[in-house]
Image (cartoon, rainbow, N blue to C red):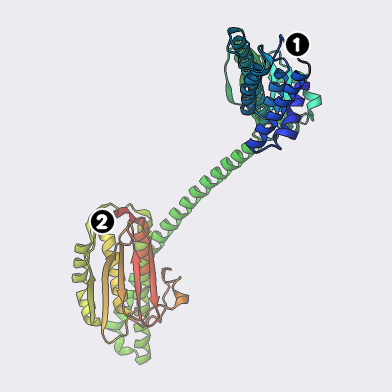
């Protein structure tokens, strides 16, 4: 059988692969059957009772070399020629029962030979393909008998276990098992004998050097043509790196969880500190403010101009410090207290804010413009009011144009509506745009553009982040600034 398979493979490589065009295959088939006819005529009439015996080898050779189509064509032609030349009466077409029966037997048996060769060829191709897959895959593939004897061992099995095929074939599969896992083989064989397929069974095997190897095992029963389980195919997938990655991921997740918990604790401590510090600072500041007021009222006439100026400066510093502590207290409360949410009509919020800051806008001679109706969102009413008030008042203050204006509107550029507050003011230099949201960060002298604590934009950013939104800006120095923000919780 091995010799026949080798011959068939050789014929495939040398002849069949060379004859890619059908015309050449049919021509070669015609030559083979012509040679068979020549041999048959050469010995005629010594074997007159066996007109087809030289054509059977031609059928086999043509089926092997040229394929089933040329072989069938040769069977038809040889049947006609034999009937005309070799079946009495010769040199004429005979349609007698014996001649028709002989042709039918020859044709049937020849077709059967062609089909068997075709099936054998397909089996060889499939086995070659399967062998190539088994040898080239990066998964260890092996097989064993029902007695646990290794019968197949691919190159990947050699690599991960360290045994060559010569060392493994014919040996017991238990040579790969740790001593405390030998019982596994009994259980696995019992399940395979019942026809079970075992998938993803994670266990430990031993390499040739004795080191452990974590594997995921898949076993499938091998059946003969009668359906009986005669062996087991095994796939062992090395999961050592996978386990190491999983362990590393678990460690990273644990570290991340601990870091998040520590960050939450630290943030809470910072919020508590800011609240306590700002709250406790207000009392001495109030005392300083009161004593300075008493001095100004009761002792101002006893002080010279410079003394009264110093008292005024102390008073301003105390007021500024009070504003700073108030801002710090507001910011700490934003980070620690829950925000109750409700349906908020931003158009109504803007109307209310515009009415509240009307005196400020009037004193600064600023026009408030509308850029379309604002949407209804879900948010915290009081905090959203703070956002609008801070942004509009800031825009109104930082403006040196003869005709000042602030525009509030909405852009629907995507799924989330984007609210904007635009002005034609002094603008923000590019190198300062990253720091405007920092607490107590002022870009100008304390006495310019109406002063302030420098915490307004920090509070605005914090409020928007508490609504799962974001805020950003676009600005042109000397031509104005536009602040954009979204409120994700309101969508």
Q: Nearer the viewer, residue 374 or 429?
A: 374
Q: What is the secondary structure assignment of the residue under circle 2?
A: strand
Residue beneath label 1, please?
47
Quick one: label 2, few (<14), some, or many (20+) residues within 10 Å? some
**Left or right of 437 in this view: 75:** right
Q: Residue 250, relative to residue 105: is it above or below? A: below
Q: Residue 399, relative to residue 62: is it above or below? A: below
Which corner quadrant holds the N terminus? top right
Q: What is the secondary structure assignment of the residue under circle 1?
A: loop
Q: Which of marks 2 and 1 is nearer the N terminus?
A: 1
Expressed as whole percent of the image width and height from the top left, the position of residue 125 reads 66, 29
* Badge number at residue 377: 2
Q: Which of 111 and 356 is in front in this view?
A: 111
Residue 466 falls in image quadrant: bottom left
Residue extending farthest to the bottom is: 305
**Left or right of 448 in this view: 142:** right
Residue located at (60% from left, 13% from top): 94
Expressed as whole percent of the image width and height from the top left, the position of residue 13 reads 73, 34
Expressed as whole percent of the image width and height from the top left, the position of residue 86 reads 69, 15
Q: Distance between the residues labelled 2 and 1?
A: 104 Å
| One can see residue 177 in this view | no
| One can see residue 18 in this view | yes
Q: Residue 327, relative to residue 401: is it above or below? A: above
Q: Which of 315 and 155 is in front in this view?
A: 155
Residue 33 falls in image quadrant: top right
- The answer to whether the residues at label 2 and label 1 have Cβ atoms under 8 Å apart is no
Residue located at (57% from left, 40% from top): 250
């Amino acid at each position: 059988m091995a010799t026949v398979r080798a011959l068939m493979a050789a014929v495939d490589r040398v002849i069949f692969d060379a004859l890619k065009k059908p015309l050449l295959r049919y021509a070669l088939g015609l030559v083979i059957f012509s040679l068979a006819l020549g041999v048959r005529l050469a010995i005629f009439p010594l074997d007159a009772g066996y007109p087809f015996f030289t054509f059977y080898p031609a059928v086999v050779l043509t089926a092997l070399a040229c394929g089933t189509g040329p072989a069938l064509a040769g069977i038809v032609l040889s049947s006609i020629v034999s009937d005309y030349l070799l079946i009495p009466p010769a040199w004429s077409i005979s349609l007698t029962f014996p001649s028709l029966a002989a042709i039918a037997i020859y044709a049937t048996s020849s077709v059967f030979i062609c089909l068997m060769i075709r099936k054998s060829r397909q089996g060889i191709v499939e086995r070659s393909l399967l062998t190539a897959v088994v040898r080239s895959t990066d998964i260890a593939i092996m097989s064993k008998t029902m007695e646990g004897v290794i019968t197949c061992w691919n190159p990947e099995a050699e690599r991960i276990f360290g045994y060559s095929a010569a060392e493994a074939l014919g040996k017991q599969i238990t040579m790969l098992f740790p001593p405390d896992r030998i019982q596994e083989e009994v259980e696995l064989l019992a399940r395979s004998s019942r026809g079970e397929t075992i998938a993803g069974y994670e266990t430990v095997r031993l390499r040739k050097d004795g080191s452990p190897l974590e594997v995921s095992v898949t076993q499938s029963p091998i059946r003969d043509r009668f359906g009986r389980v005669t062996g087991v195919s095994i796939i062992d997938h090395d999961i050592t790196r996978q386990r190491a990655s999983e362990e590393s991921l678990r460690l990273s997740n644990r570290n991340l969880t601990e870091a998040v918990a520590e960050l939450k604790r630290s943030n809470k401590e910072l919020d508590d500190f800011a609240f306590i510090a700002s709250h406790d600072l207000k009392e001495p500041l109030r005392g300083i403010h009161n004593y300075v007021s008493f001095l100004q009222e009761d002792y101002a006439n006893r002080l010279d101009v410079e003394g009264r100026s110093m008292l005024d400066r102390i008073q301003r510093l105390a007021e500024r410090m009070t504003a700073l502590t108030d801002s710090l207290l507001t910011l700490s409360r934003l980070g620690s207290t829950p925000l109750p949410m409700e349906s908020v009509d931003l158009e109504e919020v803007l109307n209310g804010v515009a009415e509240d800051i009307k005196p400020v806008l009037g004193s600064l001679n600023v026009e408030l413009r509308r850029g379309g109706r604002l949407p209804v969102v879900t948010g915290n009413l009081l905090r959203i009011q703070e956002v609008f008030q801070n942004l509009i008042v800031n825009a109104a203050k930082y403006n040196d144009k003869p005709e000042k204006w602030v525009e509030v509107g909405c852009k629907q550029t995507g799924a989330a509506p984007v609210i904007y507050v635009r002005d034609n003011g002094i603008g923000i230099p590019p190198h300062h745009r990253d720091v405007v949201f920092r607490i107590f960060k002022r870009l100008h002298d304390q006495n310019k553009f109406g002063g302030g604590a420098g915490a307004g934009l920090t509070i605005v950013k914090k409020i928007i982040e508490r609504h799962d939104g974001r805020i950003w800006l676009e600005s042109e120095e000397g031509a104005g600034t536009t602040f954009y923000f979204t409120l994700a919780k309101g969508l």
